[in-house]
Image: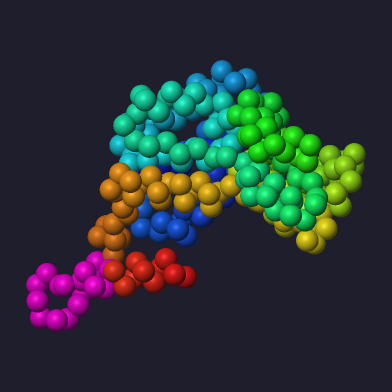
Amino acid sequence: MKIGFFDSGIGGLTVLGHALKILPFADYIYYADIKHVPYGEKTKNEVRQYVQKAMDYMAEIKVDAVVIACNTATSVADMKLRRNYNFPIIGMEPAVKPAVAYCKEIGKKVLVLATSLTLREEKFNQLVHRLDATEMVDTLALGGLVKFAEQFEFDTEAVHQYLQKEFAPLVLSDYGAVVLGCTHFPLFNKVLQQSFTEDTVLFDGSVGAINHLCDILEQKGVAPSLDDKIKFVITNGNLPPNDVDYKKILQAYVHSI
Ligand code: DGL
């Protein structure tokens, strides 16, 4: 089974990382559109075209499913696009829902970090509105982090200074939760956590997206197969070896760890 991942650059690796843990037996193709990164500073129409091009590529190489591992691309993608392809397309959603639920309990605010395009888009604003959380959710565009990540700069003096400047107008202790609404941002988990109090929780939508991918694959009756990945030689004298039980036990064990 072949699953396509797509992002403007390296950010989608933070989603692919969770996929490798949850679905270790699939084949993965990762498409990074670094020719056009950062998407957050492009127009909606430009990003729509990039998404279309990536999906055409995925169709050409015959994937079984695609994860748009990019919040910005998901925010602007015309989901009618799905009709043009015969594979499921899974998008990202900033993890505002669990963050709001958590902060309602502890009586604190939520800060959503994303690209400016994501934050401007209707999809994001409707999400906050649906949760009746407009009052308790603040937003901050951190497009600079995308640029740092693309230069493989994660924990440098320049990154610290950038964050210090961007966070200066905020009272950081007000936030019980910080939503990482751009897939590049978990690459800065350590630096971001240091900026807030120790008990501020960082929320990331990756696991949700991969769980959704699993549900969709299950509904379609496609499952990653161990057959392509591991060949068993079992000395029971039978040919071919009866490896069904071995595969079942291995699969169950992988899911349990
Ligand atoms: N990784 C991206 C996201 O989740 C895209 C950032 C960009 O290219 O500006 O939004």
**Is any atom of residue 40 visible in this view?**
no
What is the x, y in percent for residue 55?
Answer: 41, 30
The image quadrant that residue 62 belongs to is top left
Residue 161 lies left or right of residue 237; in this view the side is right
Q: Is residue 196 above or below residue 44?
A: below
**Is any atom of residue 201 visible in this view?**
yes
> What residue is shown at x 90% (from left), y 39% (from top)?
169
**Is residue 243 on the magenta stretch?**
yes
> What residue is shown at x 15% (from left), y 72% (from top)?
241
What is the x, y in percent for residue 24?
Answer: 40, 59
The image quadrant that residue 230 belongs to is bottom left
> What residue is shown at x 64% (from left), y 49% (from top)?
98
In front: 119, or 238? 119
Residue at the farthest top position: 45
**Is residue 228 on the magenta stretch?**
no
> What residue is shown at x 36% (from left), y 58% (from top)?
25
In front: 74, or 164? 74
Residue 20 lies left or right of residue 232; in this view the side is right
Q: How many callouts does the rendering have?
A: 0
Q: Is residue 113 above or below residue 231?
A: above
In front: 7, or 23? 23
What is the x, y in percent for residue 115?
Answer: 68, 34
Main SS of the magenta segment? loop
How are the colours assigned in the image?
A: rainbow
What is the x, y in percent for residue 181?
Answer: 65, 41
Residue at the farthest bottom position: 236
Magenta segment:
231-247
